Image: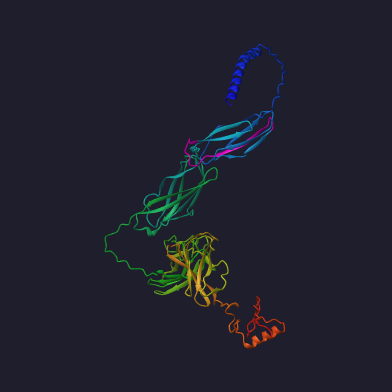
Amino acid sequence: MKNLMKTMFGLCFVSILILSSVLPQAVSAQEGTPTVETPTEEMPSPAPVADAIINATLDSYAKSAAPGTAVTYNLRITNSGDAADTVAITADTDVSLSSTSCTLEAGAQCDVNVQVVIPSTYVNNQYFAKVVTVTGTLTTIPLEFITTAVITVPVTPTAAPFSRPLLVVDSYNAGGAITPGTDFTLKVKLVNTGGSEAKNVVATFESADFLPLETGGVIAVASIGSGSNTNFNQPMRANASLWGTATGAVIVNVGYTDDAGTAYTEKFTITIGLVQWKGSVAATVTPTAQARAQLVVGGYTADINPLQPGSIFNLSIDVRNLGTVDAKSVTLVLGGGVVASSNDNNGQTSQNNGVTTTGSDLTTFAPLGTSNLIFLDAVPVGQKVTGQAQMIVNVSATPGAYPFKLSFTYLNSKGERVVDDQVITLLVYNLPKMDIGFYIDPGIFMTGQMNMLPLQITNLGKTTAVLGNMRVSSEGADITGNVALVGNLEPGGYFTLDAMAMPFATGPLDVSITVNYTDDFNQPKVIEQTLTVNVEEMPVFEPMPGEEGFPGEIPLDQPETAGDKLMRFVKGMLGLGSGKAEPVINYPMEGEIIPEGKPGVVGPKG
């Protein structure tokens, strides 16, 4: 074995030596071998590929507008390549796009509206930047634009000067101090200080101290040029009752128009001095009190309380005479506005017994069926007379306290017309108009069981009502979940409350609902409503056949008698079966009436 190993080792060594001597020669011989190059064919160039070339521009990269304004940019996308492409348009938040994609053929273009809104809270020159991006198959183009808030201060245009006529009193003269009861001429000089001509000039003279003569107190001229003046001469008579006073007054009302027909009015007060009476010193005469009637309102009532817009009511007014003489031909004027009789040319009281009313205030309260004049005839001293009138509250009236003027016109003992004015106060409310009921039929309630009360309150009025707590109670039931805050109810709005009630006894059950609120005069008020439901006794259900069976039923498992055993023995001998018979139970079907007497059990025959 050892010799064999040595022999193999020697052979391997010799092989290595031979290879080491032959391998270099083979390598050198290979290096000297000439290389033959194979000619290659030139490949043709590939045809150019058609591509889309996408460009995108905005009509402007910076715009400005007022805060709260929407600003629109125009985005134009063009395809200058040789192939079609579909681009997607995206933008930052708060940017609106009219389109989010466009399909562009070669050489085509697409317009997209880009809109942003400047926040209303921005101040002047505050700006923000947004980016809109156009993405094609080979191209992505981001475009940034800036929007600036600009607050423009409006420039108030300077009004063009307008030259209007303006008449003023330049001077007036009455010829010195006037003696009461004598005639004189009042001279008034009017001058036009305006920049245009005053046309259709009309001057009226009014006074309780001086009576106009001849002209009726009205003087007119065609025109007064700018810078010109005109004299007005008005004959007048001083009232004899002016003795003891130092001055009297005359009101001059001047009306006129300009070239365009615009009307103007001016009012001037002219003071006229009076002659003072001078007499010798004498003892003061004690004045004697003049007997006269005095009518006052002792009380008034309305048959409807409270009054609301559109209410028709009867107003009763108690009139008392607190004077010293009887009042005759008494007329009550609703709304007031009675014109007292004036003095005649001789300084005496006019004997005109008619009643003239101008400017009666009947805007909120107006009479129905009759005019605003109520004839009461005579009111004796210390007596009370009642006047009545049917009135209506205007539907446009708002809640509040309204003074209502009353005028009493009557004749005194001398036959002179006298007017006494009185004022009463009427309150107008706007109460909420609510409907309380069930929004569905509650059905029949059972005693001892919880039953739902489907309650609903609806605003039938024309204005919003503010209501407080809605509370449900009943003396014949235990109610839970019975309180809820209603709050604001718009016209036609409603509020629901599902309370649970457990009645105590059968019969009609009254359920009381109350809603609190505050009226127009800040007084607490309550809306009350009573609803009725029917309550019946809880039904008692009969037990189904079972272990206990029907009442009075013979138990199914009965003991076997000796006769039964003998009968089974005989049946067994005859081959009829000797087994114990099982009873058959016939349960009633639904709706079947069980006859009285024996229960539904069928036993063995025989």
Q: Is residue 119 magenta?
A: yes
* Viewer-proximal residue among 389 and 508: 508
Q: Is residue 145 depicted above or below 317 in this figure?
A: above
Whole-percent x, y for residue 80 in the image: 66, 28
Give how far across and how far down residue 192 sits, in percent. 47, 42
Please identify the quarter of the rendering in which residue 348 is found.
bottom left
Instruction: Kindly identify the residue that appears in the image at 43 percent across and 52 percent down.
Output: 251
Q: Position of residue 392 (x, y in %)?
A: 52, 66
Q: Is there any visible trace of residue 167 in the rendered image? A: yes
Q: Determine if residue 70 is in view.
A: no
Is 192 placed above or below 440 here?
A: above
Q: Residue at (32%, 57%) from the top-left corner?
A: 277
Kindly identify the residue that appears in the image at 68 percent across and 12 percent down. Answer: 33
Image quarter of the N terminus: top right
| In front of the other: 314 or 504 | 504
Q: Is residue 463 left or right of residue 37?
A: left
Q: Is residue 503 magenta?
A: no
Position above or below: 132 against 187: above
Where in the figure is residue 581, as x and y percent of width and height? 66, 81
Please indicate whether residue 119 sits to the left or right of residue 556 in the image. left
Q: How many marks?
A: 0
In this view, the residue in front, 121 or 449, is: 449
Magenta residues?
A: 105-127
